[in-house]
Amino acid sequence: MPARVPMIEAYNNLLKLESFISATQQFEALVVYLASQGACLEQHGNIEQYLQTAGNELLRRLLQGHLDHRATHERPRQSVTGADGIRRTYCRQSVPRRLATVFGEVTVTRHAYQKRGHHSLYPMDQELNLSADKYSDGLRQRVAIESSKSSFDETVRSIAFNTGGAVPKRQSMQLVTKAAIDFEAFYQTRADQKESTSNLLVITTDAKGIVMHKEDLRETTKQAAAKQQHKLKSRLSPGEKANRKRMARVASVYTTPCFERTPEQIIRSNKAHNVKRPSITNKRIWASVERSSEQVIQEAMEEAIRRDPDQQRDWVVLVDGETSQLASIEAELKAQSLGATVIVDFIHVLEYLWKAARCFYSLDTDEIEQWVKGRGLKILQGKCVDVAAGMRRRATVEGLSQDRRKAVDTCANYLQKYRDYLKYDRYLEKGYPIATGVIEGACRHLINDRLGITGARWRLSSAEAILKIRSIRSSGDFEAYWEFHKKNERVRNHTSLYAKSQLLEAA
C-alpha cells in the first residue's frame, strides 16, 4: 500500500493541471471500458486492437498536454536577434503550428519574434528541435526504417497500421531523402577511430544495376536508350531490356583473422572435414548509385586508412575481375601509396571452369565434376597458366570448332590475364580470404532485396537515399547516425538562424 501512495498523489496532482485534463479523461475512459461487462465478453485480439487505437489517442493527448504545459510557461522576451544581426522586437504570442507524430496530430503553440521584412524566429521550435515540415522526429525515423525495408506503398500502410500517424507516399519519399542527408558527414566524423588489432583488413567492392527512369540514367546509357527501338508497345521483347539500369557501386570494409587452409581443403566437398571459419567483425557496407565507381572505391580506401592509418596490418582487396573496377583500385592504391594484396575471387574462376568443362563433357556427369575439381585444385596450387595451356591443347587435339571451344578460350584468356591476382597458393598460406561472399551478400541485401522489386523504376534521389539508409542499418550504425542527424537538423533548422549571443540566452 505505501508504494501506491506516491502514484496516487502524482495522479491527483496531474488532475489539477488544466493542460492534461483531456488526457486524464481519455485514461479514465480506457479503464472504465476495460472493466466493463462488454469488454469482458470480447476476445483478447479485439481488446488489443481497441487499446492500440485508444492507447495512441491517450498518448497523443498526453503529448498535446505536455506541449500546452510548455506553452503556458514560455515567457515573452524583449527581443530575439537572428544570425542576420536583426533584432526581432515584436512578440506575437500563441502562434500555432501542426505537428504530425506517431500518436497522431498535435498543435504546438509558441511565441513568434518578428521584424517587418524579415523572417520570424521561434525559440520554442529550437528547444523542441522541430523539423522544418510538419512531421515529428518519431515519424521521420519510422519512415526511414520502414522505407528501407519495403516499398513506399507498404511503408504508408505500415505507418498507418502500427502508429496513430499517417504519411502519404510522396511525403515518405521526401522524408527518406532528408533522413539520409548526413550520411557522408557521419562517417567523416569517425576518422579518428583506429582499430587496435593485428587481424586482416579486407576491402571489397562490386557493382549492381538498378532500373531507373530514363532521365536519371548516366549520360551514355541515356543516349543508348534514346536510340533503342521497341517491337511491342505493351512490354519489352527479348534483348530490349538493355540500357534501363544505372550501376550502383557497393563497397565493404571489414576485419577478420588470418585463416590458413590448403588447396585440398578448399576443393574437398565433404563438409565433415571443413574447418569452422573465423568470424568477421567491424563490417561496414555501403553503396551509391549517385556517386561514381571511382568515388566509392576512394571512400573504401579512406575507410581502411581510418582503421589502419600506418598500414601496420595486412590489407586484402577482393574483387571479381571486372576490368574497370580493377583499374580504379590499382589507381587508387598507387595515388595514396597504399600497399595491398589484390585478389580475384576464386568462385568467379570456378564459373569460367564450369563453362569450359561443358565443351568437353555432357552436363551433370561425374566426369565433368572431377575435371573441374582437378583444374580448380591446380589453380589453387598456383598453376593457373598451366591449366590455361592444358585446356587449349585439349581443345586443339580434340578438334573442337571455334564456336565449340569458345568457352575454353574465354576461360584460358581469363586465367592468363589475371594470373597476377590468382596466386592462391600464397594467399592460402598467409590465411587470406579468396572469395567475395561478403560483397555478393551485400549486393543482394542492399540492392536486390529492396531496389530490385519487380516493376520498380527509381528516381536518383530516392534510390540513393534508400541505399544510404540500408547501408547505415546494415552496418549497425543507425542509432548513432540518427542522433548525429538530429544534431545537424537542429543546426540547419534553428541554431544557424540565431546570433551566437542569442543562443547562449536561449540555452
Image (spheres, grey):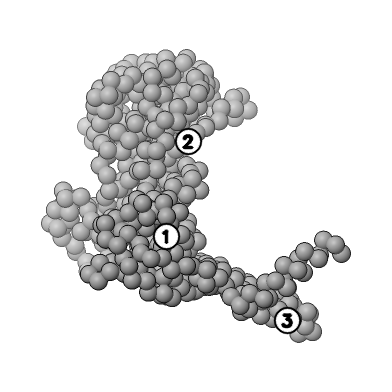
Q: What is the residue that sits farthest to the bottom in this orientation?
A: 38
Q: Is residue 179 left or right of residue 10?
A: left
Image spot of residue 138 (x, y percent)? 50, 61
Q: What is the residue that sits farthest to the front in this orientation?
A: 78
Classify mark 2: helix, strand or loop.
strand
Which residue is drawn at the image coordinates 26% and 36% (left, top)?
A: 294
Which residue is drawn at the image coordinates 41% and 70% (left, top)?
A: 111
Quarter of the image containing the C terminus?
bottom left
The residue lying toward the viewer, choosing from 119 and 85, is 85
Residue 275 placement: quadrant:
top right
Q: Which residue is mark 2?
A: 283
Dot 2 surroundings within 10 Å: few (below 14), some, or many (20 or more)?
A: some
| Marks 2 and 1, the one that precedes in the sequence | 1
Checking the image for residue 33, the label placed there is 3
The residue lying toward the viewer, choosing from 66 and 262, is 66
Which residue is drawn at the image coordinates 71% and 79% (left, top)?
A: 28
**Distance CA(mark 2)–CA(mark 1):** 36 Å
| Marks 2 and 3, the one that precedes in the sequence | 3
**Distance CA(mark 3)–CA(mark 1):** 40 Å
Quarter of the image containing the N terminus?
bottom right
The residue lying toward the viewer, choosing from 19 and 339, is 19
User: Answer yes or no: do the residues labelled 3 and 1 have beta carbons within 8 Å?
Assistant: no
Classify mark 1: helix, strand or loop.
helix
Q: Is residue 390 visible?
A: no
Q: Which residue is mark 1?
A: 126
Q: Hey, what amino acid is under mark 3? A: Tyr
